[in-house]
Amino acid sequence: MSETSRFIRPILQFLFPDASEETLRLYHGAIRKFAHFAEYAVLAFLASRALLGSHFAVLRRYWYAAALLLVLIVAGVDEYGQSLDPSRTGSLGDVMLDAAGGIFAVIVVALFRRVRRRRAASG
């Protein structure tokens, strides 16, 4: 949190000048957690797009599982690496949050594909 406070904190203080220290810390924490979700949603989205265009039929067919597996591996390795650094903490909760971002993106891609297929089939 100390790393991101250099640029997030001034923005929060500008947006919420009357906020208490506790409120600013809460907002900062929420922004950091949302960033976890968003980063891994982007990873899953990009992986989904790549896998759907793969030359390998098995990856095209099971793109959603492969994208989520990639998200889980990257999130797990990242948190494990953080747990080895005494100044940081690795968290299973963060892996779950990262996975939720990945699941969200995969669902969005699947819904978008379904809509496109229905439109193509109807006209």
Image (cartoon, helix red, strand yellow):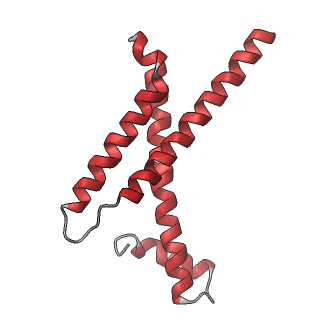
Would residue 53 be visible to someone looking at this image? no
Compared across the picture, whether 29 is left or right of 85 comes to right
- Asked whether the viewer can see residue 35, the reply is yes
Q: Quadrant of the C terminus?
A: top right
Which of the 4 image quadrants contains residue 47? top left
Q: In which quadrant is the N terminus drawn? A: bottom left
Q: Residue at x 49, y 80 (%)?
A: 25
Image coordinates of residue 52 in percent, x first then y, are 48, 20
Residue 37 falls left or right of residue 83: right
Task: Please give the name of the residue rendered at 36% of the width and 35% of the height, measured from the top-left corner.
Answer: 70
Q: Left of 95 or right of it: where is 106? A: right
Q: Nearer the viewer, residue 54 or 16?
A: 54
Measured from the top left, where is residue 111 in percent x and y?
66, 30
Q: Is residue 123 above or below residue 80?
A: above
Q: Is residue 29 above or below residue 97?
A: below
**Vertical relation: 38 (above or below) 28:** above
Q: Residue at x 29, y 51 (%)?
A: 78
Residue 49 drawn above or below residue 44: above
Q: Position of residue 118 (x, y in %)?
A: 74, 17
**Picture quadrant where residue 87 is located:** bottom left
